[in-house]
């Protein structure tokens, strides 16, 4: 795999994972708005997303940005690792 294909792979997987995590985040927030408080996903998201606060605009945006950035983090870390171990 050349550096060009690695960069393309990171770009593809970065967008894929970021959008997946962002959509998952939005679904969980929507779920939390529809169900009683005892069924909220807040306890799962809050420790992973710095700045996330339930039902505040800054907290919502911080959670969305954090979710999106975690996807890029995973792509940037996992693809080179996959390349390294698959070449062995």
Image: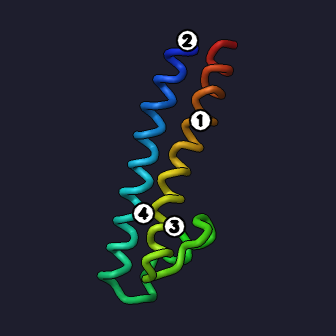
x%, y% of residue 78?
60, 34
According to the image, label 2 marks what residue?
1
Q: Give yes or no for contact between labels 2 and 4 (Cβ–Cβ under 8 Å).
A: no
Tell me the element at label 1: helix
Question: Seen in the image, is 22 located left or right of residue 30?
Answer: right
Q: Give the class, few, some or many, for how many residues have Cα within 10 Å of label 1's Cα (few <14, many ≥20).
A: some
Tell me the element at label 2: loop
**Is 7 or 33 nearer to us in this picture?**
7
Which residue appears at 38% of the width and 79% of the height? 32
- Residue 55, picture quadrant: bottom left
Q: Which mark is residue 76?
A: 1
Tell me the element at label 3: helix
Q: How far apart are marks 2 and 3 (CA)?
A: 35 Å
Q: Depth-wise, is mark 3 or mark 1 nearer the camera?
A: 3
x%, y% of residue 41?
47, 74
Q: Give yes or no for contact between labels 4 and 3 (Cβ–Cβ under 8 Å).
A: no
Q: Distance between the residues labelled 3 and 1?
A: 21 Å
According to the image, label 4 marks what residue?
25
- Residue 23, picture quadrant: bottom left
Tell which circle, 2 or 4, labels the residue nearer the N-terminal end. 2
Q: Distance between the residues labelled 1 and 2?
A: 15 Å
Tell which circle, 2 or 3, labels the residue nearer the N-terminal end. 2
């Amino acid at each position: 795999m050349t550096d060009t294909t690695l960069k393309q792979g990171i770009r593809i997987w970065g967008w894929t994972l970021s959008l997946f995590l962002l959509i998952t985040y939005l679904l969980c927030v929507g779920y939390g708005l529809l169900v009683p408080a005892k069924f909220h996903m807040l306890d799962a998201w809050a420790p992973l997303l710095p700045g996330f606060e339930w039902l505040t605009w800054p907290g919502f945006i911080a959670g969305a940005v954090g979710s999106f950035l975690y996807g890029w983090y995973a792509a940037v870390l996992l693809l080179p690792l996959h390349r390294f171990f698959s070449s062995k």
